[in-house]
Image (cartoon, rainbow, N blue to C red):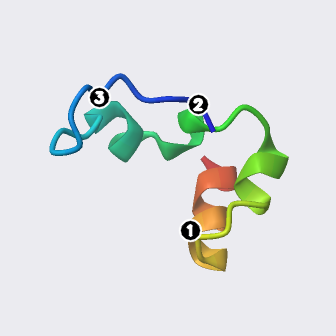
Amino acid sequence: MRPTTAFDDNVFDIHALLHPGTLFDHPRDVVSHPSLSLTEKRAILAS
């Protein structure tokens, strides 16, 4: 997974929220991510 540009734990990257697929280097990274549900994985891969 790519690092975000957030400097503080209380700040989130809006780009990551709107385009979660950009956080991953390869589709297999999405598939193997342990905390994503099957539905979330499908949505990210479809985008």
Rendered position, 26 above or below 38: above
Q: Amino acid at mark 2?
A: Arg
Amino acid under label 3?
Ala
Q: Is residue 20 above or below residue 15?
A: below
Question: Mark 3 or mark 1: which comes first in sequence?
Answer: 3
In percent of the image, x 71 and y 53: which residue is there? Answer: 30
Q: How many marks?
A: 3
Residue 38 lies left or right of residue 19; in this view the side is right
> Cα distance, mark 3 to mark 2?
12 Å
Which circle marks residue 6 in the picture?
3
Mark 2 closeness class: few <14, some 14–19, many ≥20 residues within 10 Å: few
Q: Position of residue 21 (x, y in %)?
A: 58, 42
Ranked by sequence position, the earlier of labels 2 and 1 is: 2
Front residue of 40 and 32? 32
How many angstroms separate mark 3 from mark 1 (CA)? Answer: 22 Å
Please provide percent x and percent y for residue 24: 65, 38
Please provide percent x and percent y for residue 32: 78, 61
Using the image as rendered, state which of residue 8 and residue 41 is in the foreground: 8
Q: Are marks 2 and 1 in contact (CB under 8 Å)?
A: no
Q: Secondary structure at mark 3?
A: loop
